[in-house]
Image (cartoon, coloured by chain):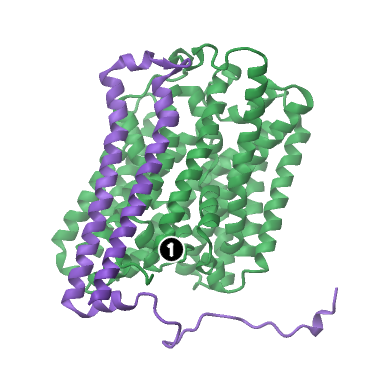
Chain colours: A green, B purple
Amino acid sequence: MTFPELNPVVGYVSLILVAVATVLIGIYGLRISRTTGDFYVASRTVRPWWNASAIGGEYLSAASFLGVAGLILLSGVDALWFPIGYTAGYLMLLLFVAAPLRRSGAYTIPDFAEARLDSRSVRRVTSLLVIAVGWLYIVPQLHGAALTVRITTGLPSWVGSVAVVVVVCLSVITGGMRSITFVQAFQYWLKLTALAVPVIFILMQLAGSGASLTDDGAVFSSSLNATGSASLYQNISLVIALLFGTLGLPHVLVRFYTNPDGASARRTTLLVLGLLSVFYLFPTLYGVLGRIHTPDLAVEGSADATVLLLPSRIFDGLGGDILSAFVTAGAFAAFLSTSSGLVVSLAGVVSQDFFRASVSGFRWAAIVSALIPLGFALLTDTLALAGSVSMVFAFTASTICPLLVLGIWWRGLTDVGAIAGMASGAVLCGGSILLAAALGADQAPQWLRLPALWTVPAAFAITIAVSRLTARRRPRNASRVLARLHTPEAA
Amino acid sequence: MSAPEQRPPRVRVTAPRSATGPAPTYPVARELAEQSDVGELFVRSLIRSQLRLSAVVASGFLVILVGIPVLFSLFPAIHSWTIATVPVPWLLLGLGIYPVVIGCAVLYVRSAGRIEQRFRDLVNDE
């Protein structure tokens, strides 16, 4: 599908500006980042406010920036559960892992697993899962980039994916995590501005024209939906996946190591909740306005373009071009920031396990971590962004979440229990999603398409049961590790 | 641009690896937990109160969250209520839930800080 209403020059200019700004900030960060510790976790000296903006910048991906509005266009009120889950996931993270995980002093999730359970095998299984989750999560970002570049410039889809990978590799291998913290913090505010400014102008224009903004409420009618309304099971299973999936996202967790102590990890999370709550108002507004002004996009595959095309449907000429440039830049920033956050955290894991944790190993690991998902993205077709990301959340909720929550709160966890839980969670959840994909979206029953509601409790139950059966393998230092995770630092 | 040769040679700065590094950040508390039965008892009760707090806040939030779709399916009439042409379910899910999330988070951060302060006071009395 082509959209002649967009001026390709606008697309080129905004994409190049964002890419150059990202690389420049990366190079500026290089002047500060020098040691291996700087590369991995910014030497743990990042302030809560910076850190919270950086977490927001990293977390708000293609699924949030484009996907939420697209889903509201397709399925109306049911789509509002996505931003709720994306936000409230941080509440669960705050309640169960933020402060203890920071006190664990580990760089990555596999580090935490090894320190807590004193086992190399747990470390290896966790590393494999983290790498799989990271790759699965980068693929939709690259699909989003492909869609954006195709719609805004008319270039072939692969250009978008390749451009994102090149910019991410450049900024990650030059600056590491420290510069990424600056880049990510900048990206949050860029994304917020990129959505807020156009929608404010759009609302002013519509209000000035005297027509009802909501078309007297008709915009909310479910008759505009392209999909049937979701069942209670679907809503609850989705929310469980999003709530508990956030806990296990590798690029989010690595951010918590950059807080100076446990209490500031909590303050950071609180700020993140505020930043996300403000942000999600805007994709929601785009989705609602799109139901009146871009109804032709309400088909699978096009809906994610709502945010990109809405400004040019309301404004003609230069005004439309400028506002389109805003949203295009914001969308590109979204793919860049989430992908670079994922690449940093994956490179941390890959280089520690395969490249002996040196700075040059980190750089090689970053390149490997970015190229493999690029291959996947070029070989597969675009799904609805918010939908494919929610499958990754279901998978992490069924694998990494039980390891973290039980590892932090329960003395009785054993290495065998953790491996059994992660493996069965991966098989149950991954298997259901693959089976549902093989059957097709219309044929597959809802408990296969959205498995989190039963696979998350199953993974927890298996982890606990197997740990009880192997109680003799409890690590001898479990009490000491738990004490370290929970005792507050000196005031 | 000044000539680069005049700069002092670049030095790699790393954290000290020996045991004589900076003072540990967890002084009394960790020692207690590692060495005495009383300390272990204190730490266990700290973990229990933190877990209880997290569980209470999480279940409160989940009850509210799951309550909303249950309410909608029990009373479908809610779908036809509107405020300024916006249906109530849209308002609840698009706006209303976010203050609840932040409220839960503020409540938790304050209480968790209080539990830790109580623990510090207890340990310092020893």
A122 horizontally vs A330: left or right: left
Neighbours of disc 1 within 10 Å: few (<14), some (14-19), many (20+): many
State the residue at coordinates (50%, 12%): A218
Instruction: State the SS at label 1.
Output: loop
Amino acid carrying mark 1 in the image:
Thr
State the residue at coordinates (17%, 75%): B38
Query: Residue A469, relative to residue A275: is it above or below?
Result: below
On the question of residue A384 being in view, the answer is: yes
Judging depth in this view, the residue of A82 and B105 nearest the camera is B105
Judging depth in this view, the residue of B10 and A424 nearest the camera is B10
Q: What is the number of callouts on the image?
A: 1
List x then y, in percent, for residue A295: 57, 17
Residue to which mark 1 is pinned: A108
State the residue at coordinates (60%, 30%): A307
B48 horizontally vs A107: left or right: left
- Locate the C terminus of chain A and report the quarter of the image it occupies: bottom left
Judging depth in this view, the residue of A373 and A35 nearest the camera is A35
List x then y, in percent, for residue A124: 37, 64
User: Tag 1, which chain?
Assistant: A
List x then y, in percent, for residue A216: 52, 11
Would you identify the image quadrant in which residue A66 lies?
A: top right
- Locate the N terminus of chain A and report the quarter of the image it occupies: top right
Judging depth in this view, the residue of A364 and B94 nearest the camera is B94
State the residue at coordinates (64%, 38%): A194
On the question of residue A411 being in view, the answer is: no
List x then y, in percent, for residue A404: 32, 57
Query: Residue B121, relative to residue A316: is it above or below?
Result: below
Query: Residue A192, relative to residue A43: is it above or below?
Result: above
